[in-house]
Structures are given as C-alpha cells and as structure tokens.
Amino acid sequence: MLKNLRIGTRLTLANGLLLLIMIALIGTGISAMGRIQEHLERIVSVNNARAFHGTEMQTCVSEVSINLRNILIDTDPHKREEYVKRIADFREKYGEHLKKIVELTPKDDTKGLELLAKVGTAAETARPLNTKVMELALQHKDGEAIALLNRDARPAVRSWLTGIAQLNAYQEERSKARYVEAEGDYRHARDLMLGLGALSIALAVGITLFLTRSITVPLAKAVDAANSLAQGDLTIEVRAESTDETGLLLSAMEAMISQLRAIVTEVTAAADNVATGATELSASAETMSQGATEQAAAAEEASSSMEEMTANIRQNADNALQTEKTAVQTATDAKEGGDSVEQTVAAMKEIAVKINIIEEIARQTNLLALNAAIEAARAGEHGKGFAVVASEVRKLAERSQQAAAGILQLSRSSVDIAETAGRMLSKMVPDIQKTAGLVQEISASSREQDAGAEQINKAIQQLDQVIQQNASAAEEMASTAEELSSQSEQLQATVAFFKVGNLRRGSVAVRTPAAKGKPKTIPHQVKPRQAQSAGVEMDLGAGGADLTDDSFTRY
C-alpha cells in the first residue's frame, strides 16, 4: 500500500512521524524542565527564602539577647536607651521576617505550620520575660533582672532559638527533598528522552531505508533501461510495480520504449523506401538532365538560326525601306516631269503663237518692202538706193518668213511630242505611286516581321536560358539524389544501431534499385552565329548525322 503512495506523501508522513516524535521529545523535555524549574523555584524562591528569614529571626533573637545583656552590663543611661532602641528595632525586624515565613509557608505544609506555631509559642513566652528583665534593669534592679534572666528568660530564649533552629532545619530538609525530586524528574526525563530519541533514530533509519529503497530500486530499473536504450536495445521490458512518481517514470519509460520501438521500425522502413526512392530519383534525374541538355542544344541551335533569320528579315526590311524611298522619289520626279512637260507644251504653244506673229510680221514686212520697191521704181533715179534697201529688206523678210515657217513646223512637231510624253507620264504617275504604296506596305510588313522575329528570337533565347537552368537544376537534382541516397544509406546504418527484436516492421513497398550513374553532358553542336548585317546560311544538319541521334529517346 505504501508503495502506491506518492513520494511526497511518503516523505510527508515520514517527516510528520519524526516531527511528532520530536514534538514528544520537546514536550517531555519542556515538561521535565518545567518540573525541575518548579522544584528549583521552590528551593530558591521559597525554601531558601524561608531559611534566610529563619536565620534572620535567629539573628534578631540573638541580638535582642545581646542588647539585653548590654543593658545589664552598661550603666550609662544614654547607652541603655540606645540598647533599648536596638531591641525594639530587632523585634520589629523579627516580626517582618516571621511574617515573610508565614506568607511563604503553604497551607498544606502541616509540619512547617506546627514548627511556626511552636516558634510563636516560644516567642510569646520569651518576649515578656526579656521585657521584664529590661524593665528591671532600667529600674536599676540589676539583681532581680539577672536572677529573672538566668532563671526564666534565658531558658525561654534557648527554647525559642531551638524552635527557630528546628524550623531552619526543616527548611533545609525541604530544600534537599525538592532537590531530590528535581533530580528524579531529571533522570526520568533523561531516560524518557533517551528512549524517545533511540526510537526516533530507529524509526528515522527504518523510514530512510524504506524510502531510499522505494526510490532507488525503481530508479535503478530506470537507469538500467536508459543504459539499454543508450546501447540501442529496444527489446527490453520495463514493468512498473507502483503508482508513485517512480512507477509513473517506469510506466512513461515503458511507453517511450514501445513508442521508440514502433518509431524505429517505421523509420527503418522509411529509410529503406527513401534509399530506393533516392536511387530511382537519381536515375530519373539523370534522364531528365540528359533530356534537358538535348533540349538546351536544340534551343540554342534554334536561337542561332532565328538570329540569322532575324538578320535577313532586317536586311530585307532595310532594302524595302530604301526601295520605298526610291519609289517615292521616282513618283515625285515623274509627277514633276509631267508638270514640266505640260509647262513645256504650253510654252511651245506660246512660242508657236509668237512665231505666227513673227511670220505675219515678216509677211507684212515683205509686202511693205514690195510696196517700197514699187514706189522706188516709180521714183526713178532717186529711188534706186531705197529700192536696193527695200529689196534687201524684202529678202530678209522672206528669209524670216521661211525661218518662222520652219520654226512653227518644228514647234508644232515638238508640241505633239511633248503632249504625247505628257500623256505617257500622266499614265505612269499613278502606277509609280501605286508601286510606291506597295513598296511602303512591303517595308511596313518587313518591319513587322523584323519586330516579330526579334520577339521570337528573344523568346527562344529566354527558352534557351530556362532550358539551361532546367538542365543545371536537373544536374543538381541528380547530385542531390545521389547525396540523398548516400544519406539514406547512412540513415539505414544509423537506424541499424537499434535492436527491435523480431517485431514486424511496417509494410514497405520494396522497389528494385535503379542503376546509379552520373548524368551525361551532351555537347552542343551549334554553328557560330552569323553577323546580322550579312546573309543567312542555315545548316539544319543535312551535312551529316548529329552526334546525339543515337542517345535520343522518342516519346
């Protein structure tokens, strides 16, 4: 039953029992010391005080007798008065001491009261005799006084002192009795305290041994279990035989060992699965790394080809832009040429009109010259010189008329040619303008193609970067998978430290380990990129087989 009590409760009960014994010891000691104190107090405060007062009473009686003798011896009146006064003082002191003794004597002290009564009787007998002797001496009746003193007073005083001595002896006996009682109480208390002390020591030793075993034995089991756990032995069995803290500790350790056993079993199974999965992951990462490397090579080739295509498209766009400028300029020049031809035709027509005027002037001049010649012929001799001049003028007019006729003919022919050229230019201008518009559209399309190709090129470059990153990540994943496989093997070796007996492990899906291997790095078979301003020469591998064709896996 005690084993099921909590350690705190057991310690409390043990300490409580020891405390009760200590309280009993203390109570016994205090009680014994109280009785001893009472005896000592009676001895000191009562018996010794009564003995002191008794002794003082003896002294007072003796002093009265001495002063009474002095009165008889000394005849000096002054000294006799002094002796009388002393006698009165000692009698008063005697009364005070007697009163103290009476007060200190308990009512149940029969013998003490009897001795006091005896002393009182003796005092009542002796005091009047002493007074009578003193009176006779004061009356100078020394003979009678001495006779009375020797015959009656002195025996009465002796009887009185004897009573006081008996009273003092009784007080001394009382003190000795009190001392003996105190000594008896001391021995009794000592024996009782020694017995209780021995009992408490025995109980303390027994309780200590019991408590120590009730704590150390389960703790030793717990230590043994902990040492076994430290050695990796999970096959041990721990049984709790109590419900106290140590029992709870053993129960907790039993549950912990059971849980650890299950956990280690599951961890072992999980480590096996992790090792298998890590091997498969390593193989998958190798395959992924190889595929990512091939994709990176293909993406880089596509990026290079796309850059070359972009360069060609940009060159075409530049050529189209130049052609556009030339076509627009040609259309403008053709239109201006048509306008110039129209202006030329108009000018030629104007010239023809002017030539007609000149021809008319030449004809009129010819007519005038002919009239002048006729008039000169009529004038005779006086008109010969004028006739010569008129003849020359007529010749010049004829020549002018002929030249004007030729120029007119030539102008008309030129007008016809210019009109024909103008009509042809008028027909050509819309075609040239249409051609310029088409060239502009081609140029715009080329620019759009250039922008689209540039975007495609950037996208391919980004794709190439992503693929390169994926390839790097795949290689890192392969390396990590190998490291995970190594760590899982180390975990298996670590978990193998624990011994779990023949307990079944959790269901483990055993997989065939894949072959380990490092991922191969596929070399990039990429042509150098063409200059963007040059033409494009695309090589799609027609010149020979790709080195990676044999390792390519078709999906």
Image (cartoon, helix red, strand yellow):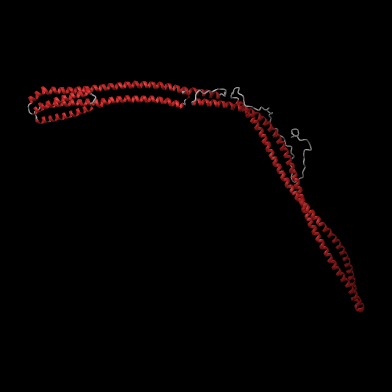
On the rendered structure, is 5 left or right of 344? left
Please state the horizontal and vertical placement of residue 41, each as a whole percent of the image: 27, 26
Name the image quarter holding residue 391.
bottom right
Q: Nearer the viewer, residue 312 or 47?
A: 47
Residue located at (88% from left, 73% from top): 364
The C terminus: image quadrant:
top right
Residue 194, quarter of picture: top left
Is 359 placed above or below 74 here?
below
Q: Position of residue 111 (x, y in %)?
A: 22, 22
The answer, for residue 81, to whether it is visible in the render is yes
* Residue in the foreground of this view, choosing between 368 and 329: 329
Q: Residue at x 79, y 54 (%)?
A: 434
317 to the left or right of 118: right
Above or below — where is 323 with respect to 472? Answer: below
Q: Examine the rendering and report whether any part of residue 387 can be seen.
A: no
Residue 507 pos. (x, y %): 64, 27
| Residue found at x 69% / y 32% | 284
Instruction: Give left or right: position of 103 versus 463.
Output: left
Position in image of residue 315 (x %, y %): 76, 47
Badge count: 0
Pick whichever, 51 or 319, lies toward us: 51
